[in-house]
Amino acid sequence: MLISLNKLREFVDFDFSLEELDDVLTMLGIEVEGVINNILKYDKFYVASVEECEKHPNADKLTICQVSIGESPITVVCGAPNVAKGQKVVLGLVGAVVPNGGFKLEKRKIRDVVSNGMICAQSELDMGEGSDGIWVLPEDAPVGMPFAEYSGINDIILELGLTPNKADCLSHLGIARELAAKLGKNVKLPNFELKPNDENINDYIKVNILNKQLCPRYSARVIKNVQIKDSPDWLKNHLQAIGVRPINAAVDVANYVMFELGQPLHTFDYDLIEAKEINVRTAEKNEKFITLDGSERTLDESMLVIADGKRTVAVGGVMGGKNSEVSHSTKNILLESAYFNPSSVRKTAKVLGISSDSSYRFERGTDIDGVLLSLNRAASLIAELCGGEVVGDYVDVYPEPVELKEIALRFERARKIIGVEISNDFITQSLANLGFEIIEQSRDEIKVRVPHRRNDVFGEIDLIEEVARMYNYDNITPNYVSSITFSGEGVHESLRTPELKNRLRHYFVSNGFNEILTQNMIDSAAASLFDDNAVKIANPLGEELSIMRPSSIPSILKTVNLNQRYGNSSLKLFEIGKIFKHSDDSGTHLKGYREDEVLSICLVGKNIPKQWADKDRNWDFYDLKGIIEDLSEFANLNITFKANELPVPAFSANSISLWVGKEQVGSIGYVSSNLLKKYDIESEVLIGVVELSKIYALKFKQNKYVPVSPFPSISRDLAFIVADNVAAELLKQEISANGGNLLKRVDIFDVYQGKNLEDGKKSLAYNLIFAAPDRTLVEEEVEKAVATIVAAIEEKFGATLRKI
């Protein structure tokens, strides 16, 4: 943002040097990114008089001029077609640097005639486009006056960098308030006189707010019988100096007041307002509207618009419409000053691809209490510059006045946070200087009322930051000493990193997986596949990052898509990250929300790199299941598998759930083809999700050392014929449950369907290992255990023992 030093001094008196001002603003959190010194920029440029003109003897299009700045005339060769004797012009002397071009003027011989300077065009001086040829000044322009002084731009322009939370500083008044607070002075508001007639404004315009959430306040004035013309030089020069293109006096006043006071305004041609009413409402679906830049926009129902009795005339807080634009034929003006919801303006501007000075301020939050001051200031200036007449009173629709926040600050808390012994009086005075109203004060704390313009102040910590700014961060001595406790107490359990988390990370890295870190925020379309009531972000960076993810799968699939687009088609990935859901549990860190940690595993493409020693193949379901089994054994998790009775979001039918005891802790399987299409993935993707937060909460038996038996084990193979809808895992669990203490291991080694088996039947073959730690088993012991197992399987599953 560009601000004028001269304009700043109109609001507050200060005698800082430029360097001191830079330091003060920086300590207040306002960075000075650049300085434009117009006094130096226009050094050696003067108002001059053309005393004589004659054609150049050696060039048809050149003129030899005798130009004076009050002294003896000097010779200047000019190529402009409009130069003439008696004109007042801008003369750049030898040594001057032309602003638009950056070249230095030197004494030069042009076609055998020495030229001692340059008669300048308006565009060459960075003073607008102007007309073809040199800039001819009014006849009363004082010869010899430095151009910067004549044009009123003998000023220094500061380029400021503001953080998004400092919306209150997006004007000269806002910066002046900061300086005044630092100096302990009062701000001087603009002194203007408004002379309305005695007509009733309600006879001219009616305002209806149909959406109070998106527009809490809307005010308007009518200025009639105006004559729209170009702005006076002082206004045009001021706007150009701060980077704004002059248009006409009415529009220029609206821009001038916006940069002066921080409140965006809009001017309508009153005679183009149908039915003489303003309706603040949302747009219709797919409504077409042509904005001031001539572009046709397609609006939707979420966008706030300003409409008259028949049609939309502006997009609220973003841009006006071509159908109500103020032009040189305008006779009557409707002036708007309103407060629009910041989120609504930001979303609308982003969707429409419009960025304006008005939307920039509205989307950061303006001062709802500053609406009328800016309205009256602009009405006064328009009437003054355009010869208009302000109609009666103003319209101000403010159905539900916004209450001011009240916040308490503890003095000792402020001293502890800042780290300096600051007096209670200093804290109180600093907040009062910044415009916070002191409503209660005791020995231990004060209570303040926050002005609406300070929409960045929400709690006590924000007030403490304000005190620190006033104290000056340079006066706070940093303390680099750390305190170490030897009490033996560890980190609090709620903050401690679970030991299992690091063990899992080590396991996967050691087994050739790549760890990925993905965004916790996703788009609403992806989130809706997993949760219809996902956690929304109040102030998202964009629609694609507007939801806290209820599942890690969308993030994983985006990573797969990115890798495949770069030619990396075989992947072994894992991530330990967070997912977020609404919760009724009052014991959560943030009431109403739950944050869970999950382990995500992803397999895509070939299981091994292409090589001569072994044949590659695609990863399959059993690879992922085997990884989970190995992980369970490694981390002593005792994970078991069950078929999913209901469809699981994101997974195909070929998926199973993971259980620890009676607690479901995840799922594994192939990602559904419909979901893969959404991410432009053509290959199969296997994903496993383990809910670590549930596992962290479970209690596991500690591993104990068991000596390896020195006695031989006995192996038995059992094959059962069962219905083909019976899961192999269920039989395995039943075998383990009935095998007794001698059964040490059960593994499935064959699944068979086909010849010699009835339709609807399959054969499941298991290898059983029996052993005892203190003796060699005898055949009778093993046969007894096997008989018990067979009986249990036959009874529970209607199975038949098959001879192998």
Image (cartoon, rainbow, N blue to C red):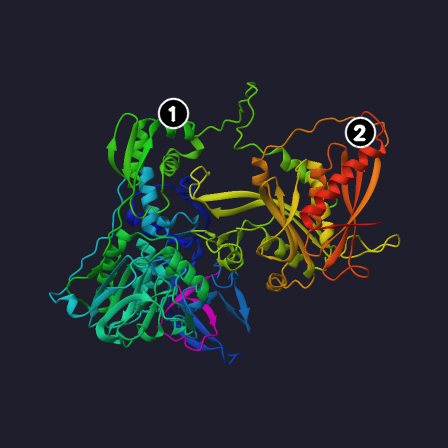
The 10 Å Cα crowd at callout 1, few under 14, some 14 to 19, many 20 or more, is few
Name the amino acid type tagged 2.
Answer: Ala
Q: Position of residue 685 (x, y in %)?
A: 68, 57
Q: Which mark is residue 772?
A: 2
Q: Where is 480 relative to 458, above or below?
A: above
Give the residue drawn at x 48%, y 57%: 542
Q: Position of residue 756 (x, y in %)?
A: 81, 60
Tell me: 392 left or right of 77: left
Say which label, 2 or 1, has the lower sequence index. Answer: 1
Give the residue drawn at x 41%, y 64%: 127
Label 2–label 1 contact, CB within 8 A: no
Position of the N terminus by quadrant? bottom left
Toward the viewer: 70 or 465?
465
Tell me the element at label 2: loop
The 10 Å Cα crowd at callout 2, few under 14, some 14 to 19, many 20 or more, is some
Q: Position of residue 788 (x, y in %)?
A: 74, 39
Tell me: 394 left or right of 317: left
Residue 520 visible in the displayed image: yes
Q: Quadrant of residue 586?
A: top left
Label 2, label 1: how many angstroms apart (C-alpha)?
74 Å
Give the magenta range: 70-94
Q: Quadrant of residue 302?
A: bottom left
Residue where numbered disc 1 is placed: 421
Toward the viewer: 785 or 491?
785
Decide whether residue 160 is among the magenta residues. Answer: no
Q: Position of residue 590 (x, y in %)?
A: 44, 40
